[in-house]
Image (cartoon, grey):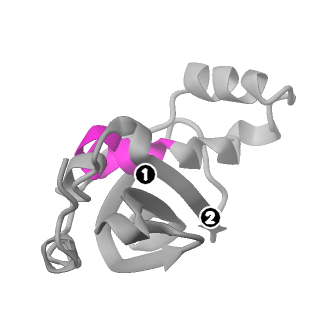
């Protein structure tokens, strides 16, 4: 597959996902918490690990769409740089959150002989007019060796 131009990838900066709503059901929180080897948190608090998937699904997108938007060469060409979560209010079970998301940045980089696009996604969860949490995800879309472009 041919490496997409830097300009064509940068066209996605500012792309907004449709947005939507997400409710973390008690059973979902129970399973997620158990997978971490933890005990359920008190008072219906949701385990923060939910922030891996709730923002993506709640914004009415998918990992597949995120791969496609960044013009991934294949599902195996993605590398994770970071997931950064900011929790402003307790994340709760059985609470309906509104979720918004967009692509904030694209940067073409060449490091250690490899070429990749560094794409930053940002998602926000709100309840009413209050921001509850945000998730900033940075993935590397590997494009091959820097000397092949």
To which residue does mark 1 refer? 55
Mark seen at residue 113 = none
Answer left or right for 53 relative to 11: right
* Residues in magenta, as a range: 53-66
Quadrant that contains the C terminus:
bottom left
Q: Is residue 127 above or below residue 48?
A: below
Residue 101 % position (x, y):
32, 64
Residue 130 % position (x, y):
47, 72
Label 2, residues with CA under 10 Å away: few <14, some 14-19, many ≥20: some
Residue 30 % position (x, y):
68, 23
| Identity of the residue drawn at 41% across and 70% down | 146
Label 1, residues with CA under 10 Å away: few <14, some 14-19, many ≥20: many
Closer to the camera, 142 or 18? 142
Q: Is residue 129 above or below residue 56?
A: below
Gap between marks 1 and 2 measured at Cα: 11 Å
Q: Main secondary structure of the magenta part?
A: helix
Closer to the camera, 79 or 85? 79
Circle 1: element type: helix
CB within 8 Å, label 1 to label 2: no
To which residue does mark 2 refer? 85
Check if residue 109 falls in the magenta segment: no
Is there any visible trace of residue 120 in the rendered image?
A: no
| Identity of the residue drawn at 74% across and 23% down | 35
Q: Earlier in the sequence, mark 1 or mark 2?
A: 1
């Amino acid at each position: 597959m041919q490496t997409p131009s830097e300009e064509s990838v940068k066209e996605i900066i500012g792309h907004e996902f449709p947005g939507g709503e997400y409710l973390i059901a008690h059973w979902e929180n129970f399973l997620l918490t158990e997978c971490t080897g933890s005990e359920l948190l008190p008072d219906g608090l949701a385990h923060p690990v939910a922030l891996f998937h709730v923002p993506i699904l709640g914004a009415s997108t998918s990992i597949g769409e995120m791969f496609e938007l960044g013009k991934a060469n294949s599902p195996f060409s993605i590398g994770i740089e970071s997931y950064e979560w900011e929790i402003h209010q307790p994340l709760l079970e059985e609470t309906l959150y509104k979720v918004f998301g967009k692509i904030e940045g694209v940067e073409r980089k060449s490091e250690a002989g490899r070429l990749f696009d560094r794409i930053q996604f940002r998602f926000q969860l709100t309840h009413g007019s209050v921001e509850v949490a945000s998730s900033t995800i940075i993935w590397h879309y590997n494009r091959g060796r820097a000397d092949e472009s």
